[in-house]
Amino acid sequence: MFPATPLLPFGKPGYVEDKWLGTNQTGDNQTSIGHVLAAFAHHSVVDSNKTCLLVDLQGLVSLVGAITLIDPQAHTCVVLLVLNIYI
């Protein structure tokens, strides 16, 4: 178990658990929060020059729209450039 799990407001009134993006699939986001998180994940790809993608975005939403992400993941790719030097 993640050590901070007991500190999270699971089951407390006013909090809803939701999942917006999976690990291997995109989400079918129908809410404004889902659209914002999909844009955030897309932004991570663009700003990292296609080397990082945020996935598995799930968490808790409060009545006022505050989001607590739980265990987000990132897929990364390291691009190595090999220089062929001929002498």
Image (cartoon, helix red, strand yellow):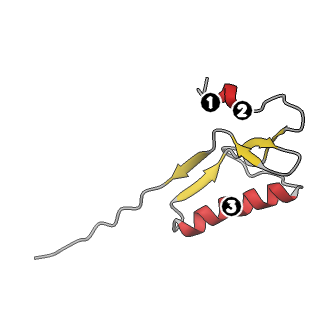
Residue nearer the viewer, 61 or 29: 61
| Residue type, mark 1 in image | Ala
Read off the residue under disc 2: 8
| Residue type, mark 3 in image | Phe
Label 1 Cα neighbours within 10 Å, binned few <14 / some 14-19 / many ≥20: few
Read off the residue under disc 1: 4
- The residue drawn where x is 47% and y is 55% is 77
| Residue type, mark 2 in image | Leu
- Give the number of the mark in front: 1 or 3: 1
Label 3 Cα neighbours within 10 Å, binned few <14 / some 14-19 / many ≥20: some
Residue at disc 1, secondary structure: loop
Please identify the residue farthest to the top as the structure is shown.
1
Separation of marks 1 and 2 at Cα, in angstroms: 7 Å
Mark 1 or mark 3: whose residue is earlier in sequence:
1
Residue at disc 3, secondary structure: helix
Residue nearer the viewer, 66 or 17: 66
- The residue drawn where x is 33% and y is 67% is 81
Residue at disc 2, secondary structure: loop
